[in-house]
Image (tube, rainbow, N blue to C red):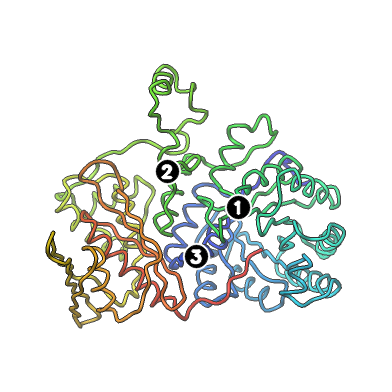
């Protein structure tokens, strides 16, 4: 086993498997921002993407590899020459990099999806890993659907990969099928079957709500790398949650006999950034980072916490970066104060994005006396989500209606030098505004989900709206922030339409281990 046998490496796949959650389509700027924050968090490996899947994905992986320092930068690749060559090309600018290659090994995947025999799969593993090793000495191999693979064949696959030069062996529970006692035993068997110098990794999905439990069972049985995603996002029901594994090891590390190297004060900031850029809200009762995770309403609990926080809290909220709301800026604040306030909460923008965020800040500050750290983060997230290539810009939205008048909305959109005006009626003011935008954009879209929340507490809180649309079979997410919920909804709806226009022909097929 490698040095530091009590250290669990944190392999973050937010930008690869996490982005494969329905409706998430991050821009390159958003991916780089998240990668930089993951480096601040101190993850060991950032899986930046799946380089072969599209030109945009390749460019994002390459930019992260050349600009983000600290963690190992990885790209996913099937055990095929084209995938591996493309991954190596994207990663070559990194100070440390890894090719993460995979193939399915279960009977159902091999027979019904790959149409390959056992020998063909073994040969593909050998050739793929050998090619990856010719580029880098840091190669990870994953057996997709390992938990439904016949054990003897799975061990044979891993032996071939190790003999070919793989330094990390990943045991994925691709469909979230395993139970903790089963998965722990499988990891123990793999650990005993491969040389000590090889790191055993877990990659658990949450289809049955067991991703964290299975990953923990893997750690107990010898896994020393855990593949996670911020807020547990990912395919279907998501992946093992980074923040939950981080705080389990932090809180129960003595009992487990392991530790990690994360800077846990960055956990909340990372969670909020990923939530804002992906449009995936964190449920209030989510462990560690949910808004209710450190809230106490019961009188007995409140009395206990006031007497001694440890009576009902096993984690210190200050440790993970929760520090309450500080009022920071208002409408009289200037650009330098705005940039300084962003820097203090860990956000650094290039000049173009800073100018856009500042203009949006001034617009909102005219309507809200003071803005908090969370308000600033929401403003920046909305502006980063509106890429430079936005075809349509919301100039204005005017709505009206009443008890006896059907709600009606008129919008003005700017498309280059052209201004488009359209009106629509709806079941409510928000429905009317969305209908008017759809007409102006001339894009057929179906609303899949709509979520509205406040950025902070209080009657003057900014409204934060996240919508998911189905546009020609593609699910896209948009986010809008405003003092008025109708305007926030219109901004979110238009942001999703712009996202659909941007990515309609840019993305290829996405495959996950």
Q: CA distance from mark 2 to mark 1?
A: 18 Å
Checking the image for residue 22, the label placed there is 3
Checking the image for residue 284, the label placed there is 2
* CA neighbours of label 2 inside 10 A, class few (<14), some (14 to 19), many (20+): few
What's the residue at 50%, 69% (across, down)? 60
* CA neighbours of label 3 inside 10 A, class few (<14), some (14 to 19), many (20+): some
Q: CA distance from mark 2 to mark 3?
A: 21 Å
Which callout, 1 or 3, points at the residue further toward the start of the chain?
3
Which callout, 2 or 1, points at the residue further toward the start of the chain?
1
Q: Which element carries disc 1, helix, strand or loop?
A: loop
**Residue 214's spot in the image, x, y percent?**
68, 46
Q: Which element carries disc 2, helix, strand or loop?
A: loop
Judging depth in this view, the residue of 435 and 14 nearest the camera is: 435
The reply to whether callout 2 and callout 3 are in contact (CB within 8 Å) is no
Judging depth in this view, the residue of 2 and 411 nearest the camera is: 411
- Report whether 496 appears left or right of 110: left
Q: CA distance from mark 1 to mark 3?
A: 15 Å
* CA neighbours of label 1 inside 10 A, class few (<14), some (14 to 19), many (20+): many
**Dividing the image into 4 quarters, which one contains the C terminus?**
bottom right
- Report whether 218 appears left or right of 51: right
Q: Which element carries disc 3, helix, strand or loop?
A: loop
What's the residue at 36%, 74% (across, down)? 445
Judging depth in this view, the residue of 334 and 52 nearest the camera is: 52
The reply to whether callout 1 and callout 3 are in contact (CB within 8 Å) is no
**Residue 384's spot in the image, x, y percent?**
36, 63
Q: Which residue is mark 1?
A: 206
**Residue 435's spot in the image, x, y percent?**
26, 72
**Residue 62's spot in the image, x, y percent?**
54, 69
């Amino acid at each position: 086993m490698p040095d530091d046998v009590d250290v669990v490496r944190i392999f973050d796949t937010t930008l690869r498997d996490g982005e494969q959650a329905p409706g998430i389509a991050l821009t390159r700027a958003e991916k780089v921002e998240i990668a930089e924050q993951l480096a601040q968090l101190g993850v060991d490996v950032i899986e930046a993407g799946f380089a072969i899947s599209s030109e945009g994905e390749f460019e994002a992986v390459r930019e992260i590899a050349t600009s983000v320092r600290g963690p190992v930068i990885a790209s996913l690749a099937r055990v095929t020459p084209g995938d591996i060559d493309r991954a190596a090309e994207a990663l070559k600018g990194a100070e440390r990099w890894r090719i993460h290659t995979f193939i399915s090994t279960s009977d159902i995947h091999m027979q019904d999806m790959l149409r390959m025999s056992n020998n063909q799969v073994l040969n593909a593993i050998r050739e793929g890993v050998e090619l990856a090793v010719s580029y880098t000495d840091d190669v990870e191999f994953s057996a997709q659907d390992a938990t439904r693979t016949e054990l003897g064949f799975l061990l044979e696959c891993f032996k071939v990969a190790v003999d070919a030069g793989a330094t990390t062996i990943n045991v994925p529970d691709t469909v979230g099928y395993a139970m903790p006692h089963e998965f722990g035993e499988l990891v123990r068997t793999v650990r005993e079957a491969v040389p000590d110098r090889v790191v055993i990794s877990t990659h658990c999905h949450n289809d049955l709500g067991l991703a964290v439990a299975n990953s923990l069972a893997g750690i107990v049985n010898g896994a020393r790398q855990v593949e996670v995603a911020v807020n547990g996002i990912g395919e279907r029901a998501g992946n093992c949650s980074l923040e939950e594994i981080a705080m389990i090891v932090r809180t129960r590390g003595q009992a487990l006999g392991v530790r990690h190297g994360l800077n846990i004060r960055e956990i909340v900031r990372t969670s909020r950034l990923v939530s804002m850029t992906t449009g995936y809200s964190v449920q209030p009762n989510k462990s560690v980072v949910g808004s209710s995770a450190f809230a106490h309403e019961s009188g007995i609990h409140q009395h206990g916490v006031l007497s001694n926080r440890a009576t009902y809290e096993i984690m210190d909220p200050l440790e993970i970066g929760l520090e309450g709301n500080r009022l920071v800026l208002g409408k009289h604040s200037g650009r330098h104060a705005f940039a300084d306030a962003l820097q203090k909460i860990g956000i650094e923008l290039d000049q173009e994005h800073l100018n856009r965020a500042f203009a949006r800040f001034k617009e909102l500050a005219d309507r809200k006396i003071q803005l908090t750290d969370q308000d600033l983060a929401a403003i920046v997230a909305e502006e980063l989500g509106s890429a430079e290539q936005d075809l349509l810009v919301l100039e204005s939205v005017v709505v009206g209606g009443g008890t006896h008048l059907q709600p009606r909305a008129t919008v003005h959109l700017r498309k280059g030098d052209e201004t488009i005006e359209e009106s629509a009626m709806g079941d409510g003011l928000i429905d009317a505004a969305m209908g008017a935008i759809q007409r102006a954009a001339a894009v057929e879209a179906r609303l899949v989900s709509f979520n509205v929340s406040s950025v902070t507490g209080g009657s003057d809180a900014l409204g934060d709206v996240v919508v998911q649309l189905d546009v020609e079979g593609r699910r896209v997410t948009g986010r809008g922030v405003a003092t008025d919920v109708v305007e926030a909804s219109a901004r979110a709806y238009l942001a999703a339409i712009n996202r659909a226009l941007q990515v309609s022909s840019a993305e290829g097929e996405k495959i996950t281990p």
